[in-house]
Amino acid sequence: MTIPVVKLVTWQQAHDLYNNHHGWLQKWLYRRLGNTFDAADIAQDVFMRVLTRRQPSQIHEPRAYLSSIARGLVVDHWRRRELEQVWLEILAVLPEPETPAPESRLIFLETLIEIDRVLDSLKPAVRTAFLLAQIDGLTCSQIAKHLDVSVATVERYIAKALRQCYALHFEA
Amino acid sequence: MTHPSVDQENLPQTASLPENIIEAAITWSIRLDYNDPTPETRQSFDQWLHADPLHRLAWQRVDSLNNLRNDCRSLPSRLAFDTLQEVDSRRQSRKLSRRNAMKLLSLAGITIATGWIVREHTPWQRLLADASTVTGEQRVLHLTDGTVVVLNTDSAVSFDLTEAQRLIVLQRGEMHITTGPDSEVSARIGRKRPFRVHTPFGELQALGTRFVVRLDEQHARVSVQEGAVELHPSAGGSSAIVQAGESRRLTGSSILPAADRYFEEDGWVSGVIAGKNIRLADLVAELSRYRPGYIVCDERVADLPISGIFHVKDTDKALQFLAQTQPVSVMYRTRFWVIVGPKSLYR
């Protein structure tokens, strides 16, 4: 059982797509982001995604297609910004001993952005249980005590969160 | 924790797996990584793992999700937790405001009691100061002349003790001063060095005293517990003497009577806010000085008169006490954002 990695657009198609729509896409992004650098970054990202897709398909409405991918990336971009903003605010009010060293902050922030992506679609109780397990390293029975629910419930929460992680990593 | 290594040969890396196998792998991960597994559990896991190559692929993937967990474990826990919860609550409240604009209109009566205390990343005053405190911290400082300075939360001071004078510069926050006898130097030079406090709004000269100076946005508030203090506005103009038991506001150009306070001016030195008939909004604003983030007080309960003693070291307990004894509810949006409102509102 082998599933070949399919290049769904041929090089010629990719070339045309880029030439005909890259400038337009970048302007489209600029209108939404108000920043040339971010617009260029995300435009690049959109094309990377299109060119490395797994499922082959003909692109009939290239601009509609490109903008639908771009829209998702713009949302990601703002989520990231927002998280970064909150992170800085909280960092500013934490007492010194609890703040990480400057050189490790970027790595921490990346980890947080990653986990934020996972948590996005989860219900508050599931979120909290998952955070306690991931960040504080608590076991299910410790979390159960903490949240005053049964161990079985906590296990269900964690399973739900792990399923979401799995989807993001292996089914995207 | 180490698990038996998975033989990855001959496994299709991109395959999508049956849902029941993914779920089984997740269930095993929960038993092994999120609980304390018994040897029997491990044994039956081994059996499952080797029963099918697809089990191995599923396990390899689910186990790799633990990388995220390991990364998370190295995060400073409070910072990580608070960041994620806070960002979530902001998103939720935006969602709520889109969905429920009408309902929110009734909440428009909420005012931010503290005016969203903006704190710079490192307040510049703190960089220049000889001594400073962060939010929630208090410090006692002993100067060479015998003077004792108590710094309140989020404050900064510098000292300049010379042959000519003793000068303290209050750059930020609040301090309590008990002036020292200065016996050593005064015996040598034959007189007592003047004791002065410099603030952005003017200067204070202490005349053998105990007093509190607190910087607010528009003025410095001076209250004297013992002896007397002479005030000089920074723009010049007439000075005035404040006697024990009195308070004044120094605005830079003038000296004004201080607004009535319903709690003791120097209560914080003993770690409490103590008083009778304190306006709830004032009490909440006062408590919020001692904790990071901000507390908002709903207009509808702002004027409730509160009497009692509240410990500034444990503001959560103080808030809890309010909720138990007053017709108010305390809602934690996050640890950094607390709303004090009418009892019925947040049920």
Image (tube, grey):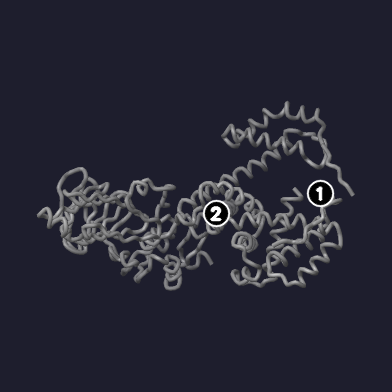
Q: Picture coordinates of residue A11 (x, y %)?
A: 80, 30
Q: Which label belongs to residue B13?
A: 1
Give the residue type that dot 2 points to: Thr
The nearer-to-camera label among 1 and 2 is 1
Residue A149 in sight here: yes
Can residue B109 be seen by looking at this rendering?
Answer: no
User: Which label was assigned to residue B301?
Assistant: none
Gap in Å between the C-alphas at discs 1 and 2? 35 Å
Task: Look at mark 2 in the image and give the residue it sits on.
Answer: B83
Name the outermost residue toward the left: B190
Q: Is residue A80 left or right of residue B207?
A: right
- Residue B155, position as x, y percentages in the image: 34, 54
In front: B246, or B330? B246
Number of residues whose C-alpha sits closer than 10 Å to that of mark 2, classed few (under 14), some (14–19) or many (20 or more): many
* Amino acid type indicated by mark 1: Gln
* Badge 1: chain ID: B
In this view, A134 is above or below A38: below
Q: Please state the chain letter of the residue tagged with numbered disc 2 in the rendered image.
A: B
Image quarter for residue B318? bottom left
| Nearer to the camera, A34 or B192 | B192
Q: Look at 45% across and 63% down and name the residue there.
A: B340
Q: Is residue A50 left or right of residue B192?
A: right
Q: Residue at x 68, y 37 (%)?
A: A45
Using residue B53 as the reference point, say whether residue A68 is left or right of it. left
